[in-house]
Image (spheres, grey):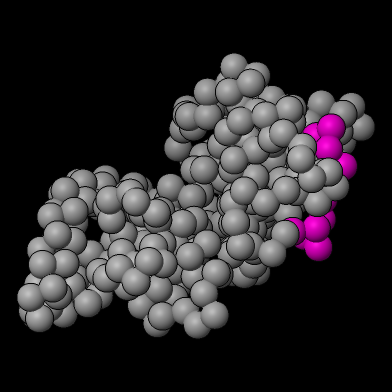
């Protein structure tokens, strides 16, 4: 009993700071969603026309786009994904012992990966909103402690290593869940809540075919898990800052969307649907 209360108090301290940040973020998100709702009817009415226009524009793109965005590593399909047991695995097609820092990615691929980070940040925010709501609805400190210990991993199987609880991300929780033979119900609920909220945001924004294109969301996020370390090392080696800027130009958004449509994203192509969603959401900002 004493140990449970101590763990609960420790977890609560970690959580308080996160709760304050989330409350502010929730207000900002609500304002953004209100704006998206106002656009919903117009966008839905125009959805078919926009899709047709983009498709025709994509068909007119010359083959020169391909070499500009294609990775020097052979293009991978969804069947090339590793078993998701570690973010440090070696991508298929690379020899064991290959230094991740030796990989070179195109400028377009760095932008596309940053778009995946944009989606990941949204999923993490929605995951935390769900977890905070669950904690607020609990009556006792012991109940809260039991809930948070699932994510803290006091049995040695932590979802996020030695970092504070408040810094846990969606990708870390997904990786944690995939490593376990049996996933706790609360972990699955947190993942599903994040994914459902992102899908609802896409629908509210008028994204055509959101339900179909996002049905493989976890498989696509495995691409983020698999290549995060490789992009991080390559960015350091090439002097590129992996810090996403929501003020990305419309020309870059269009270029990445066309690359995703034509299969020119290289190792990131299996996550093309989430990258296309990022293009859509960013074009509305």
Q: Nearer the viewer, residue 135 or 253?
A: 135
Left or right of 110? Residue 42 is left
x then y, percent, for residue 44: 55, 59
Q: Quadrant of residue 200?
A: bottom left
x then y, percent, for residue 107: 69, 25
Q: Main secondary structure of the magenta part?
A: loop
Left or right of 86? Residue 106 is right
- Verify whether residue 73 appears in magenta: yes
Q: Nearer the viewer, residue 36 or 241?
A: 241
Q: Quadrant of residue 173?
A: bottom left
Instruction: Answer whether residue 118 is visible to the viewer in this image.
Output: yes
Q: Is residue 68 above or below residue 120?
A: above
Which residue sits at x=21%, y=46%? Answer: 21
Magenta segment boundaries in residue numbering: 70-81
Task: Report the residue that reaches farthest toward the top.
Answer: 239
Which residue sits at x=31%, y=64%? Answer: 152
x then y, percent, for residue 93: 85, 47
- Verify whether residue 244 appears in magenta: no
Instruction: Answer whether residue 136 is visible to the viewer in this image.
Output: no
Quarter holding the C terminus? top left
Could you tell me how many numbered marks the image carries? 0
Which residue sits at x=34%, y=71%? Answer: 155
Left or right of 252? Residue 267 is right
Task: Report the residue that reaches farthest toward the right.
Answer: 63
x then y, percent, for residue 53: 74, 45
Left or right of 54? Residue 30 is left
Q: Nearer the viewer, residue 58 or 176?
A: 176
Quarter holding the N terminus? bottom left
């Amino acid at each position: 009993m004493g140990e449970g209360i101590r763990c609960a108090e420790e977890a609560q301290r970690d959580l308080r700071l996160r709760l304050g940040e989330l409350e502010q973020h929730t207000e900002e998100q609500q304002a953004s969603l209100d704006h998206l709702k106002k656009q919903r009817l117009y966008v839905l009415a125009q959805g078919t026309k926009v899709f047709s226009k983009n498709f025709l524009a994509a068909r007119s793109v010359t083959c020169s786009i391909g070499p500009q965005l294609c990775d020097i590593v052979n293009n991978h399909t969804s069947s090339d994904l590793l078993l998701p047991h570690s973010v440090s695995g070696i991508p298929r097609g690379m020899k064991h012992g290959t230094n991740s820092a030796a990989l070179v990615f195109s400028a377009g691929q760095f932008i596309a990966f940053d778009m995946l980070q944009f989606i990941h940040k949204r999923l993490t925010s929605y995951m935390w909103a769900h977890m905070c709501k669950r904690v607020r609805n609990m009556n006792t400190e012991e109940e809260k402690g039991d809930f948070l210990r699932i994510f803290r991993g006091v049995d040695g199987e932590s979802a996020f290593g030695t970092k504070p609880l408040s810094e846990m991300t969606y990708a870390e929780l997904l990786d944690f869940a995939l490593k376990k033979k049996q996933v706790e119900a609360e972990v699955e609920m947190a993942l599903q809540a994040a994914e459902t909220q992102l899908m609802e945001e896409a629908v509210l924004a008028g994204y055509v075919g959101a339900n179909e294109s996002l049905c493989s969301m976890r498989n696509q996020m495995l691409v983020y898990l698999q290549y995060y370390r490789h992009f991080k090392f390559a960015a350091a080696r090439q002097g590129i800052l992996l810090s996403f800027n929501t003020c990305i130009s419309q020309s870059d958004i269009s270029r990445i969307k066309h690359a995703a449509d034509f299969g020119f994203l290289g190792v990131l192509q299996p996550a093309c649907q989430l990258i296309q969603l990022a293009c859509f959401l960013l074009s509305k900002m």
